[in-house]
Image (tube, rainbow, N blue to C red):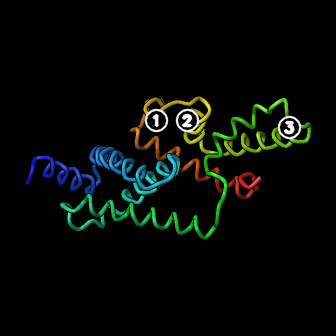
Amino acid sequence: MMFKDKLLEQIVINAKAGDEIALNELATLADKRLSIYFQRKCNNKQDAEDLTQETLLKMYRCLEGLCQVSRFWSWLFTIAANIKNSYYRKVCRQGPSQSIDFIDESSDVVKASKQQSSLEEMVSKEKSLLITEAIDQLKERSKFAITNRYFLRQGYDKISSDIGCSETIARSIVHRARQKLKIQFQKQDLLSA
């Protein structure tokens, strides 16, 4: 067995035992490989990032159930494939829909075009207000991460250093905040409008 394989096995064993440093290291290693995998399998970058984060969260939750530590990568990519397949089955059932990249679009909403009619401008301002209110309802850490990521265009490395966590955890915070906002926006019918 190669040195890298033994090192990975030790990291997995330590992560299973609850070692947070090993868990973060494992997540960083997995994040790189999963990102590449999903970028090859998905049509857009946002879906790839979302599926990567969902897979990492599932890895965190299910790591204790991993029986053969030496089969970590095949176990993880089985989870990734299942998440990808579930996602696309759900998308096919729902039919074509608007992209979940609603936060990037919201910054355009704030800057209403001069060419819009006054009614369209009023609707844009109302959407902007609803988006701001939804973001304000998030927990402080999530609000900080989501606004810095999408409105200030900061990278995950900067966000993680500001929050005081690993980059992988910062990605998870942003991902979870986006999912909460997406649900809230769907309830308010902001995504279909």
Residue at image point 52% right, 30% down = 154
Instruction: Note whether 101 is above or below 92 in the view shown.
Output: above
Q: Work out how far the residue at label 3 is from the one at label 1, CA to CA, in angstroms.
A: 33 Å
Q: Secondary structure at mark 1?
A: helix
Q: Are marks 1 and 2 in contact (CB under 8 Å)?
A: yes
Amino acid type of disc 3? Glu
Category of crowding for the residue at label 1, using alpha-carbon neighbours closer than 10 angstroms: few (below 14), some (14–19), many (at least 20): some
- Quadrant where the N terminus sits is bottom left
Q: Nearer the viewer, residue 73 or 47?
A: 47
Q: Nearer the viewer, residue 85 or 188?
A: 85
- Report the residue marked by disc 1: 156
Amino acid type of disc 1? Tyr
Q: Secondary structure at mark 2?
A: helix
Give coordinates of residue 170: x percent, y percent: 46, 40
- Residue at the limit of the structure toward the left, as seen here: 1
Amino acid type of disc 2? Arg
Q: Choose mark 3 or mark 1, whichever is in front.
A: 3
- Report the residue marked by disc 3: 121
Instruction: Note whether 45 is above or below 62 in the view shown.
Output: above
Give the numbered dot on residue 96.
Answer: none
Q: Work out how far the residue at label 1 is from the one at label 2, CA to CA, in angstroms.
A: 7 Å
Q: Which comes sooner in the sequence, label 3 or label 1?
A: 3
- Report the residue marked by disc 2: 149
Q: Quadrant of residue 108?
A: top right
Q: Which comes sooner in the sequence, label 1 or label 2?
A: 2
Q: Quadrant of residue 65?
A: bottom left
Give coordinates of residue 109: x percent, y percent: 75, 38
Give coordinates of residue 60: x percent, y percent: 37, 56
Q: Are marks 3 and 1 in contact (CB under 8 Å)?
A: no
